[in-house]
Image (cartoon, rainbow, N blue to C red):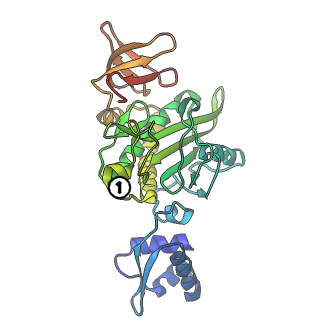
Amino acid sequence: MKTKILKLLREKEGYLSGQEICGQLAVSRTAVWKAIGQLKEEGYVIEAVQNKGYYLVSAPDLVTKEEISSRLKTAWAGHPTVFLPKTDSTNNEAKRLAEAGASHGTLVVAEFQEAGKGRRGRSWTSQSGTGIWMTILLKPKFPPSQASMLTLVAAMAVADGIEAVTGLAAGIKWPNDIVLAGKKVCGILTEMSAEPDYINHVVVGIGINVNIREFPEELRERATSLILEQGKPVSRAAVIAAVWKAFEKYYDSFIKTADLSFLREEYGARLLNKGEVVCVLDPKGSWEGIAGGIDENGRLLVETEKQVRTVDSGEVSVRGVYGYV
């Protein structure tokens, strides 16, 4: 009920009467009063005026199921939302839920991760109360060979979501690092369970530095947060809702073709490597070239003196020759 009341309060311009809430939710005034009281205890500032009703003045920076669900404007992404105060990693939890029969679109959000994961087995710092640590569970029908492109779909969604909430111009360091002012603000990790010709499930994990004011010395040159770039606190739930609204739009387009032809232009416009000299860290031998856009399969196009080569994110890494980007 708290989720529904929050949603009604957010959608209403001005005061919402108790009678309206009772009518729309088919509950008693006492039930509404109790739910409002619980929300106030959680930190929501709700003004109650006799003969006028309730007005949501402000909300705490929570990432609870109620707070996120009341903001979501999606058909399936984030439905249902599972909130955990603490977990090992949201990717692991999403995989456990998948094995237990959870549905496509299930979103796992945690306040704190004890064992957050980055690409290539790296750890991901997951401070409590300051960041977004979340994973969506997907059960697509396309072949396993096309699943890696979901990482680029997610990158576009995160960049769009950040910009929608903060106004900050988010760029992408191919394939999936979200960058603000030359520093990383978000990482994305996609993992898949599949048979040779069938996907059991895919989990897309996203970690966003939101209200982190200070980083360890070894990360300060490469990492930033939304609060550091915008100069004021940012609602984590608002960013979450904006990200999945964008993701749902892009995903629904992606499954029509199962390639990124529809996204090449938009992705290219956010691609910070584009037109820059990059070093391709290939196990077979590193080489340099000028980064272009992406092809329809999400591979980076890199121009060398002799040819344009394609780079697959699953095999190599790309680094800027003159810095992180």
Q: Of all residues shown, which one is farthest toward the top?
A: 306
Query: From the viewer's perspective, is 50 left or right of 34?
Result: left
In depth, the one of 278 and 50 nearer the eye is 278
Count of numbered marks: 1
Q: Is 53 situated above or below 75?
A: below
Q: Residue, x 44% and y 35% (percent of image)?
A: 176
Across and down, in percent, residue 277 comes to: 31, 20
Q: Quadrant of the C terminus?
A: top left
Q: Of all residues shown, which one is farthest toward the left?
A: 275
Across and down, in percent, residue 300 comes to: 39, 23
Question: What is the three-letter code of the residue carrying label 1?
Answer: Val
Q: Of all residues shown, which one is farthest toward the right?
A: 100
Residue designated by label 1: 165
In depth, the one of 284 and 17 nearer the eye is 284
In depth, the one of 156 and 113 nearer the eye is 113
Across and down, in percent, residue 161 comes to: 39, 50
Q: Is 132 situated above or below 140?
A: below
Q: Is 182 situated above or below 290?
A: below
- Displayed quadrant of residue 48: bottom left
Q: Is 57 situated above or below 117?
A: below
Query: From the viewer's perspective, is 6 left or right of 160?
Result: right
- Displayed quadrant of residue 194: top right
- Displayed quadrant of residue 264: top left
Q: Residue, x 57% and y 43% (percent of image)?
A: 138
